[in-house]
Amino acid sequence: MARLRSDFWVSAHLRRLGVAGISAVQRRRGAAEAGAIFVKVDRLDGSADLYGPAPQALFEADDAGGRRFSPILSGGTPLDAEERLAKELRFDSDLWIVEIDDRAGRHCLELAE
């Protein structure tokens, strides 16, 4: 099964977060069809988490085509997350950035095992 386009996925995820009462914005628009998606979670206490696409090697062969994420940075500072995002942008200018502000660190992402 084909994976959902990045623009549809981001739109749906922002809606899911809004329904859950989690403040989130699309900070950067990337390639509509297949841009990589990064999610920054600012815990509003001086710490932040960053999630990015999980490596394809972690996916099962029978995976239904959903997007999975893996933690890139946990409990760092917002500046640490921004520095990592800047590095990713230098590598791939077509990426998406979703930013979440949530004290509990909720993100509603499906994480790879």
Image (tube, grey):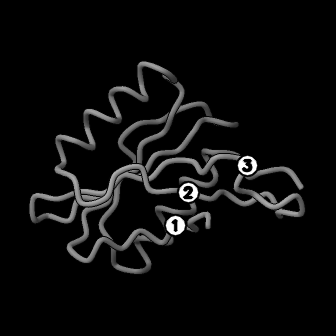
Cα gap from disc 1 to disc 2, whole angstroms: 7 Å
In the figure, 63 relative to 52: above or below?
Answer: below
Q: Residue at x 32, y 60 (%)?
A: 100
Q: Residue at x 60, y 31 (%)?
A: 31
Q: Residue at x 57, y 62 (%)?
A: 12
Question: In the structure shown, which secondary structural element does the residue marked by tag 3 occupy?
Answer: helix
Callout 2: few (<14), some (14-19), or many (20+) C-alpha neighbours within 10 Å? Answer: some
Are the residues tagged 1 and 2 within 8 Å (C-beta)?
Answer: yes
Instruction: Name the residue at the left extreme.
Output: 45
Horizontally, is 69 left or right of 55 in the view? left
* Residue 92, x across and y down, in percent: 52, 23
* Residue 38, x across and y down, in percent: 46, 46
Task: Provide the residue designation for mark 2.
Answer: 69
* Residue 17, x across and y down, in percent: 43, 70
Residue type of the residue flagged with mark 2: Phe
Residue type of the residue flagged with mark 3: Ala
Residue type of the residue flagged with mark 1: Leu
Callout 3: few (<14), some (14-19), or many (20+) C-alpha neighbours within 10 Å? Answer: few
Question: In the structure shown, which secondary structural element does the residue marked by tag 2 occupy?
Answer: strand
Q: Which callout, 3 or 1, points at the residue further toward the start of the chain?
A: 3
Cα gap from disc 3 to disc 1, whole angstroms: 18 Å
Q: Residue at x 50, y 72 (%)?
A: 16
Task: Provide the residue designation for mark 1.
Answer: 109
Callout 1: few (<14), some (14-19), or many (20+) C-alpha neighbours within 10 Å? Answer: some
Task: Provide the residue designation for mark 3.
Answer: 57
Towards the viewer: 1 or 22? 1
